[in-house]
Image: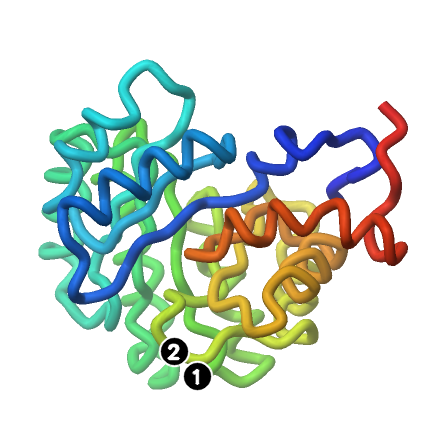
Amino acid sequence: MVDFSKMTKKDVGKLFDYAILPKDTTEKDIREGCRKAIEYNCKAFCYSSSYWTPIVAEELKGTDLLIGAGIGFPFGQQTSAVKAFEAEEAVRMGATVLDNCMNVGALKDKRYDEILKEFKEYKKAAGPAMTKMIIEVAFLTDEEIATACKLVAEAGIDWAKSASGQYQGPTLEQVLIMVDTLKGTNTKVKVSGVKFPRPQNAYAFLMAGAELIGSRSAPEIIESLDTMRQIGMIPAYKG
């Protein structure tokens, strides 16, 4: 669990991926987003497909921020071969972290062997890049959330991610299922789809055991750290 008592506001930036995902995103939006991610010391700047990778790589050159391309975004219903190609292409273009979308329908049909095979093919295709799998918990039962997380961990994927941010986000209870299921594995929990009021909800997810938040509101949430400390939601900084 994150120990906020040892974290400055700059440190807290690394708990966030700054994401720009709308369909009408322009190059100007991407470049400004990259600069904002650098300003707030985020872990990554995330975008919807490998299309923007060269521009993001240019903007983030010389920083420690990860270059985060979306794969199979946002439905996840491409074939495994298509997703693997997307992953390979994104890495070849400079992406260093990939957020892939699970085929929710296949999971609900209990095609677990097929899903596990696809997860492993994605992991292999990603090569040296950090890997995440978006399971879209709003469409899943509690049992399906746990099953999806187990498959993500079995495939060796680095992060299970709650949502793409394009639909309804997770409840605290759903995130706790993810955290509890993944205890003792090498797979961590990322939350996206944070609902209003975003600062309070984001910090609640982190206090519950998530280790990364993806949001277009990352700057606003990071800026609210002092307020969250003032009201006692987040421990004071002790150095």
Whether residue 65 can be seen here: yes
Classify mark 2: residues with Cα within 10 Å, few (<14), some (14-19) or many (20+). few
Q: Which residue is mark 1?
A: 139
Residue positioned 38% across, 78% down in the render: 167
Q: List x then y, in percent, for residue 197.
A: 62, 71
| Observer-nearest of 74 and 228 | 228
State if disc 1 and disc 2 touch (CB < 8 Å): yes
Q: List x then y, in percent, for residue 194.
A: 54, 67
Q: Secondary structure at mark 2?
A: loop
Q: Is residue 131 above or below residue 100?
A: above
Q: Dividing the image into 4 quarters, which one contains the N terminus? A: top right
Q: List x then y, in percent, for residue 87.
A: 19, 44
Using residue 132 as the reference point, say whether residue 7 is left or right of it: right
- Give the tally of numbered discs: 2
Q: Is residue 64 above or below residue 182?
A: above
Q: List x then y, in percent, for residue 36.
A: 40, 38
Q: Is residue 123 above or below residue 148?
A: above
Amino acid, disc 1: Phe
| Observer-nearest of 125 and 229 | 229
The tag on residue 167 is 2
